[in-house]
Image (spheres, rainbow, N blue to C red):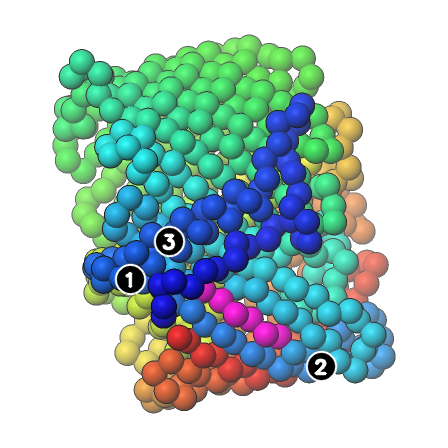
Amino acid sequence: MATGMKMQPAKLDYGTVRRFGHGGRRVALGGALGLLVSAVWAQSSQSVGAAPVGSSIQARLSVSQSFTDNLRLSDESQQDKAFITTVSPGLNVVSRSGFLRGSLDYSLNGLLYMKTAQRDQVQQALSAQATLEAVPNWFFIDGRASIGQQAISAFGVAAADSNLVNANRTEVASLSLSPYVRGRAAGLVDYELRSETLETRAKDTQIGDASTRSALLSLKGVGDGRALNWSATLRDQQSQPRSGRDTQTLSASLGLTYRPDIDWRLGANAGRERSDLQSAAARTGPTYGLSAVWTPGPRTKLDMNWSHQVYGSTHGFVFEHRMARTVWRYSDTRAVTTAFQGGSGAQSNYDLLFLQFAAIEPDPVKRDILVRQYLQSLGLGSGSTTTTGFLSSSSNLTRRQDLSMSWQNQLTTVTLSVNQSNSRRLDPNDGTADDLSRSSGVLQRGYSLSLAHRLNPQHTLSATLQQTQSRGDLSSQATDLKSITANWNAKLGRRSSIQLGSRHSNFDSVSRRYRENSVFATFIQQF
């Protein structure tokens, strides 16, 4: 690929650059993301010219033709048959060398509807993260960006395919920029001073739109290898939803860490906090917590923490174990969330295999390429294995539990993910309108099971079974979506493949029930 090519930045503004912020503070999210994309592209382009180890650029084009018997997810599916043509140019960039390190995967999906009056549309998908080392070993900037499809309400209509017409689905974009400095003062104290701005926007709705700003000062004693060490933290976090109440949390804490041996790290902290998450009148009180990390080897990790804040207790529990052919991961978290609820902690097919392939490819850049090629050869998507979640305009306390597993041998790969999330609003009287204003809590459960079997080096069969459920206080606040998808994937050459498949979905709720069937063919060309 010629290094002189220019790539237009992804447009998060849905036609015009939308501006974000409150009180005159505005951030052009589309422009900022464009800078991030262009920087990763420029760094990787330079790397391609110099051909260093650790950088790659790969463009792709996929064309898909599908037929559905229920485009608008209606009760009477016989009235809603349609053909859908999807054209998706995409780009994957990885850079692990030079002043900018990160990865970017972007695709622009054009949907053309035939045999129906439905208007054509464009969807975007983006996952990007990068670290810019502006001043060597001192000043850094972390950046993250994402675009994806998300349900607006947990109690609305759900669909297994975003190409189908669904008023309860929207495109959500987020961008996070975090500049920070870190170093050592007088040879006695390691310091880090960090700020972060996070912008989240949903298309055609203000539910989920939020701006979050935080500042952090962290100090700790010099020497990570010391058996006993100290730390101090000051934090200021402000959340400004566009259709909800602004909130702020200020905290200060002191901590101690103790390492009895190389496998264990124990910690304790205590401090004070002032927060208005539960009501407009801020409350001040003590905070304290405990933590423990156990890493007996490169294949196993156990990370636990518990904290008490003025608005309640939070915790985190993560266990990972990797064997020769199997990866297990379990997480149980309880934390404050805003804007998009229920998604954190979900493990994708990519995440599981990236962890598992560490045994055969320790280099993260080469492993990224290996995992993506492996998933494509099996006909499995790299995205999240479950799709629970909803949009919110308030601060909520969410507990999420996830169990994920991946197993593979020379011919067969199995991935399994099971999750449950339970969200409740911290301030029940903040006046915002979303799912948690109609129910005191939202309970969601889901699972996904994928099986792929390689018939020969060129042909693979795969199947995916999924189910998601949502429950609220009322009997009318209950939805259930089941779907099964089967694929046949064939390599046509080194860089091209074709996929044939079919899907059956069944959705059930008080207000609507539907069945949907589809068949599809997809051609993928990599460059």
Mark 1 vs mark 2, CA separation in Å: 40 Å
* x then y, percent, for residue 478: 74, 53
Tag 1–tag 2 contact (CB < 8 Å): no
Residues in magenta, as a range: 86-91
| Mark 2 burial class by Cα count in 10 Å: few <14, some 14-19, many 20+ | some
Residue type at the position of mark 3 = Ala
- Rendered-image quadrant of the C terminus: bottom left
Q: Which mark is residue 48?
A: 1
Q: For the residue labelled by badge 1, is the local secondary structure a helix, a strand or a loop?
A: helix
Residue bearing the label numbered 3 = 42
Name the residue rendered at 57%, 64% in the picture. Answer: 108
* x then y, percent, for residue 516: 72, 75
Residue bearing the label numbered 2 = 83
Residue type at the position of mark 1 = Val
Q: Is residue 448 left or right of residue 240?
A: left
Earlier-in-chain disc, 1 versus 3:
3
